Amino acid sequence: MAFIAEHGGDVGKREISRHFGLDGSDRIILKDVLRELAEEGVIGRKRRKLHVPGALPAIVMAEVVERDEDGELIAQPVDWDEEEQGEAPRILVRLARRGRVAGPAPTIGDRVLLKTEELPEADGHIRHNGHVLKLIDKARALTLGIFRRDAQGGGRLVPVDKRNMGRELAIPPDFAGEAQEGDLVAVEVVRHHAYGLPIARVKERLGSVATEKAISLIAIYAHSIPSVFRRETLAEAEAARPATLNGRHETREDWRDLPLVTIDPPDAKDHDDAVHAVPDLDPDNEGGFILTVAIADVAAYVRPGSALDREALVRGNSVYFPDRVVPMLPERISNDLCSLRPLEDRPALAVRMVVGANGRKKRHSFHRIMMRSAAKLAYAQAQAAIDGWPDETTAPLLDDVLRPLWAAYAAVKTARDARSPLELDLPERKILLKADGTVDRVIVPERLDAHKLIEEFMILANVAAAETLEEKRTPLVYRVHDQPSLEKMSSLREFLQTLDIKLAKSETVRPAQFNEILARVVGTELAPLVNQVILRSQAQAEYAQENYGHFGLHLRRYAHFTSPIRRYADLIVHRGLVRALDFGRDGLPESTTPEQLAEIAARISASERRAMAAERETIDRLIAHHMAQQIGATFHGRIAGVTKAGLFVALDDTGADGFIPAATLGQDYYLYDESRHALIGERSGEMHRLGDRVEVKLVEAAPVAGALRFELLSEGARVAGGRRGSGAPGRGGYRRPEQRSATSTRPGKGPGKGPGKRR
């Protein structure tokens, strides 16, 4: 244990065996000992290395949360899964020597990038020190909310954060400034009273959210997402000139005669990937194909250290809302110079891949090219042509372009099926807005072969990029996804046992094991439940300088290469390829160190989490606005989450999430059974379990916070003999029937756990 703690999570069985001089028979015993320690929660496994629970990566994004009794700053990691990793560790912030960190010193509420140091103590615990590498974001000592004007000229602030629901602030007329009814404003609290509301002053008027069309403003400001480009960034973008076939610093291959096509959603504004396929005429590769994936050459315009580059790193990625996009790069770059528009010359990085009849890649090569897209197609449009309904755009492309693409996809799919990546069935919903920005309807887009074709070709290209950079010994940022922790696997195994589904104990876990379970429940009532529980057992994908593989895709090495217009990680990979293959002078600087890439990986992983939270919250608010006029209406849905506090229900029609407090469930005291993912009545044995179908009534909607509260109308299943299993009690209790509808519990809604498609 001391050895594992001392080495900061960078040891496995091999290192332990070498340190203690263990031979073959001893290693068998060691394997059993480590498994027992892991099952007891004494050690954990992350990135295929052992660590003491609470250990941190070498570089971590953290938030300064308080000062200790000595006045020292204490931080906690931003990206920390308490359910999987336990309580977040406290990090003693050590300021760098004078001159090492630009800008002001960090204070409480700031986000900082820390280089961590783990110091084992005598009692077996770890003390964490964190040396400040960079101050990322200064704290906002302001509260965001919607201004509601009163008759006296002042008003109240309705906070947008669900955690502050019901905690309104009073704004006197002298402190209201120019705020208007329905404005999103930032205020500072200036006085607290023993009785009555705190007094606040409007510091910033951020815009009106009187219409749903502007509701994404709330998430943009609440998460401090940069939405206005700096002047120098825009000036640099406007000054950029189109790349040419023979530039000053690079020479491109002329591929303008190759009929590459883009296939995207119909509303896409930037097109950063194009594809092409032909049968391989090599007699040694009978039935094989030559696939080409061409990606917009963003590196030609966004040079390391430039204003464009600095702001792209701050943003990390584009953020997509139903009514707008907050792009990583200005439109001059993203929608013009780098967008692979049809019949226009565009620079690109292309990978040509030779695959066999079985779909396995035999070899590949990268090229810096000038291309000219033959057509811009939508997914449904391309699919319709293959299905026998070509239009005037797809008809000329059908035989020479589209059919070879689909034939190549059939081969690639064979290899994919053999690889057996994780196959969760979690439909993604999409909100369609009316012209005025209000919600029209929520749909589940059909998953077409056209979608799967592009996805598989992009995965192949991403793998090829990682392989090339490794072969050339060029540093890169990987896209990684750890295998589920032993603790989560143990919980999943216990839950599946309640469904009479066996999950064998094994030190190594493969996606195929989950797929076998999912296949057993396809088409049954258990399918949504099992998909959700397996999803929740998975780790979070992230970016890292260290490679520990991609569990979900079942790949040993994987990097993001195919979307440099909207992801900074892909731009780093492009620069690495330019440098490794001597494609020009705008590649990854030779001075780039692994530590710098680890810093970038931490920053863009945090940016991705920020974007996901903002997108999810915006959808919640749009749906809550849409349903605010339907108080009292009844709906059907499924239980999507179970906690001690109550049930989260996702509605069938819209996918909207709402909360049912445990205290409102009925004439019983409901206890939380962790192994069953259920609330169970102590006396009645009535059980409400994750995945159960339910009927609910909407009793309250809070559009500003994106929160809905339901009342449960349907009865749960009965557990013979009353409650079974163990777990902590919920906050529910006995309620007489006449009390049930008079509960004053505030609406609330926990963080969404939607699957996303962020591979």
Image (cartoon, helix red, strand yellow):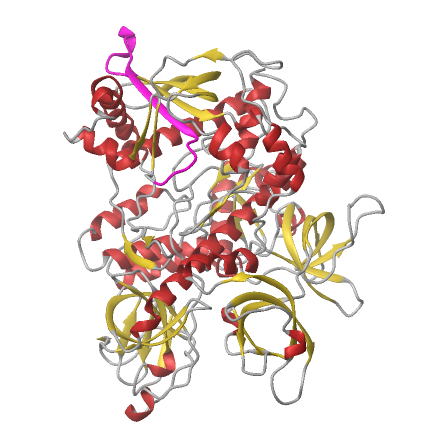
Residue drawn at x 45%, y 26% is 295
Tell me if residue 277 is in the magenta stretch.
Answer: yes
State the image coordinates of residue 154 (x, y, percent, origin top left).
60, 78
Choose top left, top right, bottom left or bottom right for residue 757. top left
Q: In this view, does 79 lie to the left or right of 505?
A: right
Residue drawn at x 53%, y 57% is 85
Tell me if residue 181 is in the magenta stretch.
Answer: no
Quadrant in which the C terminus appears: top left
The one of 622 and 575 positioned closer to us in this rendering: 622
How many marks on residues? 0
Q: Is residue 397 left or right of residue 44?
A: left
The one of 592 and 439 positioned closer to us in this rendering: 439
State the image coordinates of residue 173 (x, y, percent, origin top left).
63, 78
The one of 105 and 373 positioned closer to us in this rendering: 373
- The residue positioned farthest toward the top in the image shown: 283
Choose top left, top right, bottom left or bottom right for residue 110. bottom right
Q: In this view, does 741 lie above or below 55?
A: below
Can residue 367 be seen?
no
Residues in magenta? Answer: 267-288
Q: In this view, does 463 lie above or below 518?
A: above
Q: Is residue 334 above or below residue 702?
A: above
State the image coordinates of residue 602 (x, y, percent, origin top left).
60, 45
State the image coordinates of residue 127 (x, y, percent, origin top left).
70, 57
- The residue positioned farthest toward the left in the image shown: 388
Can residue 332 be seen?
yes
Residue drawn at x 47%, y 22% is 348
Q: Is residue 208 left or right of residue 9?
A: left
- The residue positioned farthest toward the right in the image shown: 98
Choose top left, top right, bottom left or bottom right for residue 525. bottom left
